Amino acid sequence: RNCHPGKVFVVGYANGYRGYAPTEDQYAWDGKSGRAYSYAAYSVPFIRGDYPFHPAIGATLAQAMTKLYYELISH
């Protein structure tokens, strides 16, 4: 959303797959909603033999990619 629409493509399944980068709400579980743990946040890391990412991973990646985008177009 912070870059030029239609000019940015994110390729998620290239050069190795590290799993999903879930949004922070996918890590929430209060025990009252009855919602099971999120597949993207918990199941995929377990299947891969990894620990879950930090809940801020989605926002952190989006900020880093936006910064990189603007660095690349400024040259």
Image (cartoon, rainbow, N blue to C red):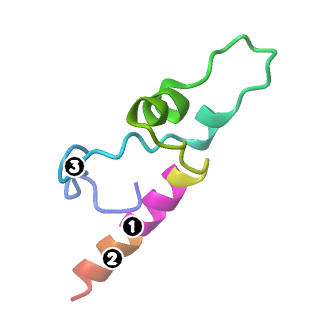
Could you tell me which residue is drawn at 30 percent across and 71 percent down? 69
In what quadrant of the picture does the N terminus appear? bottom left
- Residue at label 3? 11
Give the main secondary structure, helix, strand or loop, of the magenta stretch: helix
Q: Secondary structure at mark 3?
A: loop
Secondary structure under badge 1?
helix
Q: Would you name the residue on which mark 1 appears?
A: 66
Check the picture and name the quadrant holding the C terminus. bottom left
* Of residues 46 and 15, the one drawn nearer to the viewer in this rendering: 46
Could you say which quadrant of the image residue 70 lies in?
Answer: bottom left
- Which residue type carries mark 3? Val
The foreground one among 66 and 27 is: 27
Given residues 50 and 26, the one toward you in this image is 50
Magenta residues span 58-65
* Label 2: few (<14), some (14–19) or many (≥20) C-alpha neighbours in 10 Å: few
Residue at the spot of label 2: 70
